[in-house]
Image: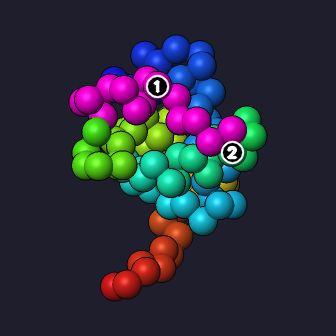
Amino acid sequence: MNYATLSNRQQAYITAIITHAPALGIDIEKTTFSRAELRQVSMTEKGKKWIPNWITHDQSRRVARGMFNIPEVMDAMSVTPGQGHDQDQEMDALTLVEGEPTPEVELVGA
């Protein structure tokens, strides 16, 4: 599945993960989430610890005991032209003009 094929309620939970997880110290640059991480998101979003059944009862999402595969989080964060998220604002602001030199880019870890 990808984000676009999810129901509105499923998309809302994926959005809740993306919105609340960073403040809870949960890394969203991954596809596997623990039951404890999802409970934190659920408590923040709805005040209840219950994780949606479409995640917990789907055997294809179960990676290990208490671990669930939710690739839609990464899919929802992918950038398409004209859209983006907070981390890509620098690149959105960069305008390249034909015939002018490409600006210097610092490579991290190089």
Tag 1 secondary structure: helix
Q: Nearer the viewer, residue 110 or 28?
A: 28
The answer to whether residue 54 is magenta is: yes
> What residue sits right under mark 1 in the picture?
53
Q: Position of residue 93 (x, y in %)?
A: 67, 54
Q: Position of residue 90 (x, y in %)?
A: 63, 60
Tag 2 secondary structure: helix
Label total for image: 2
Disc ID at residue 43: 2
The answer to whether residue 34 is magenta is: no
* Drawn side of residue 44 relative to residue 72, left or right: right
Q: What amino acid type is highlighted by mark number 1?
A: Asn
Q: Residues within 10 Å of mark 1 (few under 14, many from 20)?
A: few
Disc ID at residue 83: none
Q: What amino acid type is highlighted by mark number 2?
A: Met
Above-or-below relation of 40 to 10: below
Q: Nearer the viewer, residue 12 or 35?
A: 35
Q: Nearer the viewer, residue 39 or 82?
A: 39
Q: Residue at x 46, y 25 (%)?
A: 53
Q: Residue at x 48, y 74 (%)?
A: 105
Q: Residue furthest bottom?
A: 110
Q: Residue at x 50, y 60 (%)?
A: 27
In the rendered structure, which segment of residues is drawn in magenta? Answer: 48-61
From mark 2 to mark 1, how far is it between C-alphas?
15 Å
